[in-house]
Amino acid sequence: MKSDGESGDKALAGDDRDRGGERVFHGLAVSPGIAIGPAHVSDHFDIAVAEYQIEPEQIADESSRFAAALATSVKQLRKLKTKAQTLPDAAAEEMGYLLDAHLSMLSNSRLVRGVEKRIAEQRRNAEWAIQAEIAGIGESFAGMRDAYLAARFDDIRVVGMRLIRNLVKTPFEAYGNLPQGTIVLAEELTPADTALLDPRRIAGFATVLGGAESHTAIMARALGLPAVVGVAGLLTNRVTPENAIVDGSTGTVVINPRPETVARYRARQDQLGVEKRQLQKLRRLPAVTRDGVEIQLEANLELPRELDQAVNAGAAGLGLVRTEFLYMNRDDLPDEDEQFEAFRGLLRGMDGRVVTVRTLDIGGEKIASVLAGVTGSGGANPALGLRAIRLSLKERRLLDAQLAAMLRAAAYGKLRILLPMICNVGEVRRVREAMLQVARRLRRRGIVIADPLPPLGVMIEIPGAALAADALAAEADFFALGTNDLIQYTLAIDRGDEQVAYLYDPLHPAVLRLIQFAIEAAHRGRIPISICGEIAGDPRFTALLIGLGIRELSMAPGSIPRVKQRVRSIDTVAASRRARAIMDQWDPGRIATLLDDFNALA
Ligand code: PEP
Ligand code: MG
């Protein structure tokens, strides 16, 4: 039951009420739980900037790097401006002026001209040139004792740091020195930034930008951190956040809460704790439906440190290990040995259960600065560009190192290899050929590898792959349905963009038909199929997916107990009947009603 305060908050969604210093905001609830603690505003001023000389023939390239950072910054500011328009009038106006001022500093300003000149004449790298130019502007402002001008200089510094951040592409900062229980508030956290948040220190986070199905959101759920993203107006200058509450279940963020608000949220936190302990009791019970059908509930892993969580949640295996996080927040590439150790560690930890390791899925919003040289700027449509398996097949040294590490680790347990973003059978054949070559090379060197070679599976996450699933089933040993991307590409919505998040609909009839088609193709081809997109961890969809024939679901470890509870209340015959009724519908509203009514029966 919601308290009056909460329903009142909801009515003012997007508002920033000011009650005795307390301010309430709303955004997208992406990771459940309540965090209460001291607030830390993630600022942009701590980036260490390298200084290096460039050769005359490198000047053009360095200027293009700067131009690309300018373009990204303009894009970000425009996005923030659109977001600010959802604020109440006065705040929207204030933010609009500020962001316009920032935008104007990025077009033919003294800052931009000065940086270009320093790159060309002093032959230094762009980030150093920005820092030097800001220092130069600072000196000319220094003599003027004028509060207005001081504020303008602050704006120039903020814009300059945005440019530097976009150039060096490193996370905001290390969060290791923050007091325990801190809540991080930021304009945006990339997946790499989020990977640095240690749940033992950080209690939760809220950001102005970000979509519900972004990898940042997935990472928050993986780490069990309460999180709200897409919060308009969160970081205006009008208030200095000292304490904050993040309610990742309702999407509410309270800045500088009053004591009675804290008391209310503490009570809710206690209640959630009780529910969690009750769910934990399910750990030892099997994931079996009422009519005795066993459902494999597995864990998705972003970081090796989540292994304990997966084991404690009683995961039947690891249905998706995202290896890209081995490549983030570092200056060198992980070599074959390091990856071998990481994968073998997972197999040992899972003690005989299946571990599904996916080859690198870098690209789109998942950027590793160490690979910036090979991924490039990502083009106009990074989600459609050189990413995932396309990158691995182009940069064979990346693929070969991963395959070698996997083949070696597979000698120690049940490892399966999974390929992201497959769009045609040729890609699967090329990877299989690469795997055979790597296997031959390792055997020649007398290195122990798995025998037989591990199963090679395909992510079905491109609509074309779903429609070609029969052909792919003939080449692949198993399928994993990646509904996060499947929904993104089918409905043409950026999963990381909060402005179109309202269109992100797993129950869209086109999405359901693609899922159904892929499941039936897997059954016809007699290969296993699982779902490892985020819908696998949402109990709302469990009955529908089981009704469509799914028997393997992989999700954030924290979601396993709730999904298991749902599995144990389902009758598969009734679920299949309801799934058929749902698949006869074209109207999304009717589909949702049919599903929710069925869920309410249990
Ligand atoms: C998916 O797309 O559903 C998926 C599981 O992969 P990722 O979220 O890493 O893109
Ligand atoms: Mg994907």
Image (cartoon, rainbow, N blue to C red):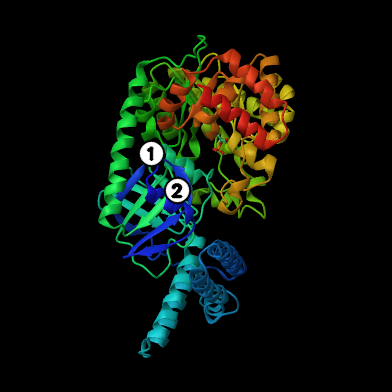
Can residue 175 be seen? no
- x then y, percent, for residue 288: 47, 14
Rounded to the nearest whole Å, what is the CA distance between mark 1 and mark 2?
A: 15 Å
Along the viewing direction, whichever of 183 and 472 lies nearer the viewer: 183
> Where ligand 2 lies, by image quadrant?
top right
The residue mark sitting in front, 1 or 2, is: 2
Relative to 416, 277 lies left or right: left
Residue 202, given in percent of the width and then of the height, sits at 32, 47
* Residue at the farthest top position: 292
**Residue under the point 41% across and 16% down:** 352
Residue type at the position of mark 1? Gly
The answer to whether 175 is drawn above or below residue 146 in the figure is above
Pick the front one: 591 or 522: 591
Give the labeled residue for mark 1.
224
The residue at the point 45 percent across, 48 percent down is: 251
- Whichever of callouts 1 and 2 sits on the residue coming sooner in the sequence is 1
Is the C-beta separation of discs 1 and 2 under 8 Å?
Answer: no
In the rendered view, tell whether residue 85 sits above or below residue 572: below
Residue 199: mark in rendering: none
Q: How many marks?
A: 2
| SS category of the residue bearing label 2 | loop
* Residue ranking furthest to the bottom: 144
Question: Helix, strand or loop at disc 1?
Answer: loop
Q: Position of residue 414 (x, y in %)?
A: 48, 18
The amino acid beneath tag 2 is Gly
Q: Tell me the residue that label 2 is attached to.
A: 251
